[in-house]
Image: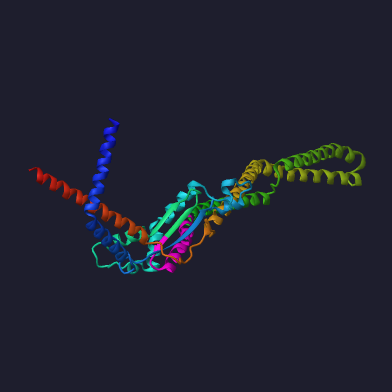
Amino acid sequence: MYKKQQEKGYLEATSILYLVLKWKRPLIIVTLVAAVCSVIFSGETFIPPKYKSTVILFPASTSSISKAVMEDHPGDKQDILAFGEEEQAEQLLQILNSNEIRDRVIKKYQLMNHYRIDASDKYPYTQLYSEYNNNITFQRTEFMSVRIDVLDEDPQMAADIANDIAALSDSVKNKIQHSRAVEALKVMENTYNDMRKQITMKEDSLRMLQRLGVYDYKTQSIVLNEEYSRAQALFTSGTAALPVFEKYKGEHDTMVINTRARVKGAEAQMRDLENKIAVVSKYGSMYMALNEELTLDREQLSKIKERYDKIKADAEQNVTNKFVVNYAEKAEKKTYPVRWLILVVSTLSAFLFAMLLIFGIEKYNRFKTTL
């Protein structure tokens, strides 16, 4: 069985060699014509050469200044000097493929004219975007970096476009983040201002209570009650001693006069202290509540101010979101077309096509002879 298959393969190989030798002149002519045509039509006259420029960059792990700089204990993923990972690389690719970057590049370099697209055609922008996508590509490398490749007939323009796209990635990302941060800043600013108004109103209320004589409810209550007890004791003892002094000393005696004065002073002091105690008793609880609320509100205001400062830093920042490893440079050697590859492929294709045609002719001739 194996020997028969071997003999069959040998016969087929022999028949192919026989056909090649039989049709060698047409095969040589076709192959040479294909080689000459590929050399001619792959020249600059028919296929304008294109030059490639490349930018290699890494995304940053974080683009938030507040998290990277203003946090007390930032993590590794919030380090402003750390390279980004897969997630950041994918985000950067999405930004690079955004319509805003595409449209800004098209407008700056007038790619409609540069790519020789007639604006009066039926689908000019479809042609333009197709040319853009064919000549400008973005891809993530195995090292989590992002590669920007630009092909163009002008080597300097290819380098300029690649570098501009890398720069535009920062402005587009910052624009997206700024729009969100500004909205958050407005909300936080309103919250901060409302809290300050509340604190100001409570401070005004406290000042009103202080003008009424309420300063420290607990301390004042203790001091006023002690003073009232002393005044009351003085009034009681003076009131009890005054009739005795008047009886034995007379109304005009110095001791009587002094005792009567002390009693009146104690009585006046008691009335004054009673008024003060009444005010403190009436407004003391309000004073304590306002004071405690103010303490809590000031702590809350401090936290809001801290968050406000962080959001403000994010809203006003304009930092780079990438690390550029290689900037694009003007290419000295063309990248496209690869003439030797065109020559090999076209010549080999012509030879194989000629062989298939020969096989067809031979089969047809054999079929005719059997009729």
Judge left or right: residue 292 versus residue 105. right
| Residue 201 in view | no
- Image position of 110 with respect to 362: above or below: below
Depth order, front residue of 133/190 = 133
Q: x, y percentage for residue 21? A: 24, 52
Residue 236, image quadrant: top right
Which scheme is used to colour this image of the protein? rainbow
Residue drawn at x 86%, y 38% is 243
Judge left or right: residue 48 versus residue 23. right
| Residue 111 in view | yes
- Image position of 74 with respect to 340: above or below: above
Query: Magenta stretch containing residue 162, yes or no?
Result: yes
Judge left or right: residue 307 versus residue 45. right
Depth order, front residue of 250/213 = 213
**Residue sitting farthest toward the top:** 1
Q: x, y percentage for residue 150? A: 41, 61
Q: x, y percentage for residue 100? A: 40, 59
Depth order, front residue of 141/104 = 141
Residue drawn at x 29%, y 36% is 6
**Residue sitting farthest toward the left:** 371
Q: x, y percentage for residue 134? A: 35, 58
Query: Magenta stretch containing residue 324, yes or no?
Result: no
**Residues in magenta, as a range:** 150-177
